[in-house]
Amino acid sequence: MIEHDENSTDKLHHQTDHHEHHSHQVTERVWGMKDIFVNFYFIEDRETHQWVLVDTGLATSKNKILKMAGELFNDKPPSAIILTHGHFDHTGSVEALASHWHVPVYAHYLEFPYLSGKASYPPPDPSVGGGLMSLLSPFYKKEPIDISGHLNALPEDGSVPFLSEWKFLHTPGHAPGHISLYREGDRVLVAGDALVTTQPESLFATITQKQKVCGPPSYFTYDWIAGEKSVQQIAALKPTIVASGHGKPFSGAEMEKELEALAQNFNATAVPESGRYVDEPAIADASGVRYLPAKIPSSSKAWLIALGLVLVTITAFSVTKSRKKKLW
């Protein structure tokens, strides 16, 4: 059983006053924050009180991260930045923050091609359906960044630098070197995008943050067989709390039920009916992407549907906000 850290709770209360709409304490010594549609996490070590940042959000996230870090840790810099994977919405501020703090960045070695400027990820797949976030995916940044001056490989033994209670799991499928972080003492899981807690393909779900245990964002997932194994690996741990890259932290009986259902019925509930990587995965290794299945032709009709979904989502969100204001 982890001890209660009263200093952490005091810091949470101070931090919540300033960021009540965007930040949250996941559990003891773990905090999270959302920027637009993606989450990043702050984790403190119980013994040493060193802390690390897990993922760095978008390019717009830097100042929000610095402000929250200042409030939580009195401007003490992290000992490191840990990346669950290298997609644009998890690395948007990594170079700026690593340079600002002069700290190392750790990632799985299979992510190195995309973090050292050598290779691009498999292209996103808008044909998977599910909502506007999928249809817009061709416009998401997929080119590599180069942070090789800060980059370090995570240890082969699964330990997490500077966090003695945590280990990392290699959970590929969404990205070749994707990892999730796990604290065995209280079974807390920081999942990255191996699975998420809102429907990532839907703009409406992304805005409302409606909780649901879902598979990895399908428009970027390049290997569904590996993705299924990763979800089953996570489910076998029986986590008490799941904090993912998209959606609110999820715990309790409903989360446990949905996670087990996802692991048992992954093909039916997570894998799209069609898509570039559904029948045949891309192949990647330590040098980057080695093979890509044929691209599925896009339809101009899809963009008309996308425009309609944008208008419907904006209208619905405006109505929801208006009703909430009236209730309060």
Image (cartoon, rainbow, N blue to C red):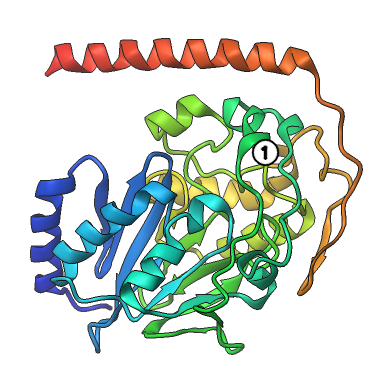
Horizontally, is 28 left or right of 179 in the view? left
Residue closer to the observer: 17 or 113: 113
Image location of residue 246, percent across then percent down: 46, 46
The quadrant of the picture occupied by the N terminus is bottom left
Q: Quadrant of residue 98?
A: bottom left
Horizontally, is 166 left or right of 272 in the view? left
Q: Which residue is drawn at 14% across and 55% down?
A: 15
Q: Quadrant of residue 36?
A: top left
Query: Circle 1 — which element?
Result: helix
Confirm whether residue 265 shows in the render: yes
Q: Which residue is drawn at 42% across and 72% down?
A: 81
Q: Residue at x 22, y 83 (%)?
A: 49
Task: In the rendered view, tell whether residue 155 sits above or below residue 44.
Answer: below
Q: Quadrant of residue 288?
A: bottom right
Task: In the rendered view, tell whether residue 235 sits above or below residue 20.
Answer: below
Confirm whether residue 53 shows in the render: no
Image location of residue 64, percent across then percent down: 27, 52
Could you tell me the amino acid type at mark 1?
Thr
Image location of residue 258, percent across then percent down: 52, 45
Q: Mark 1 points at which residue?
A: 269
